[in-house]
Image (cartoon, rainbow, N blue to C red):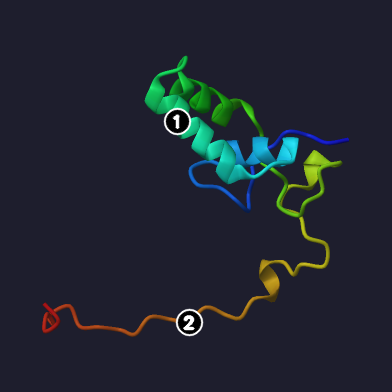
Amino acid sequence: MKKLTKSRDNKMVSGVLAGIAEYFGFDPTLLRIIYGAATLIGVGSPFILYIVLAIVIPEAPINGNTKNPKSYGFKPGAKGPEHHAPRKEAEKVKEEDWSDF
């Protein structure tokens, strides 16, 4: 089942218009042009509608799995933070050394 979500791949501001275009299956650039023209002409209140949609429409899942909303950000086989290289220590600098300024 298809679900309306904000686009993660094709966003200009928050991904609302690209998400709507992807949902209905047409070019996001065309929808952006229509939205810009409607904003300039003053049809309704597209700016307020965009803000409301940006708040209401959920983000698309990171891994593309739209069936399980709890899978946001989970990538199977990804190593946890314990597998990262050890952090490097910063070099010690004398407090009196202001030669860089």
- Viewer-nearest residue: 78 or 57: 57
Q: Is residue 65 above or below residue 56?
A: below
Image location of residue 46, percent across then percent down: 48, 23
Query: Residue placed at 63% from the left, 53% from the top?
Result: 9
Query: Residue placed at 61% from the left, 42% from the top?
Result: 18
At mark 2, the secondary structure is loop
- Viewer-nearest residue: 38 or 50: 38
Q: Earlier in the sequence, mark 2 or mark 1?
A: 1
From the viewer's perspective, is 64 left or right of 84? right
Q: Pick the quarter of the image with the C terminus.
A: bottom left
Image location of residue 82, percent across then percent down: 68, 71
Report the disc number at residue 64. none
Q: Pick the quarter of the image with the N terminus.
A: top right
Tag 1: amino acid: Ala
Report the disc number at residue 88. 2
Q: Distance between the residues labelled 2 and 1?
A: 52 Å
Say which quarter of the image contains residue 36. top left
Within 10 Å of disc 1 (Cα), the crowding (few <14, some 14-19, many 20+) is: few
Say which quarter of the image contains residue 30. top right
Total marks drawn? 2
Query: Residue placed at 54% from the left, 23% from the top?
Result: 52
From the viewer's perspective, is 17 left or right of 35? right
Tag 2: amino acid: Lys
Within 10 Å of disc 2 (Cα), the crowding (few <14, some 14-19, many 20+) is: few
Farthest-out residue, top: 44
* Residue corresponding to mark 1: 37
From the viewer's perspective, is 15 left or right of 70? left
Image location of residue 78, percent across then percent down: 76, 67
At mark 1, the secondary structure is helix
Q: In this view, does 52 lie above or below 2?
A: above
Q: Nearer the viewer, mark 2 or mark 1?
A: 1
- Viewer-nearest residue: 84 or 37: 37
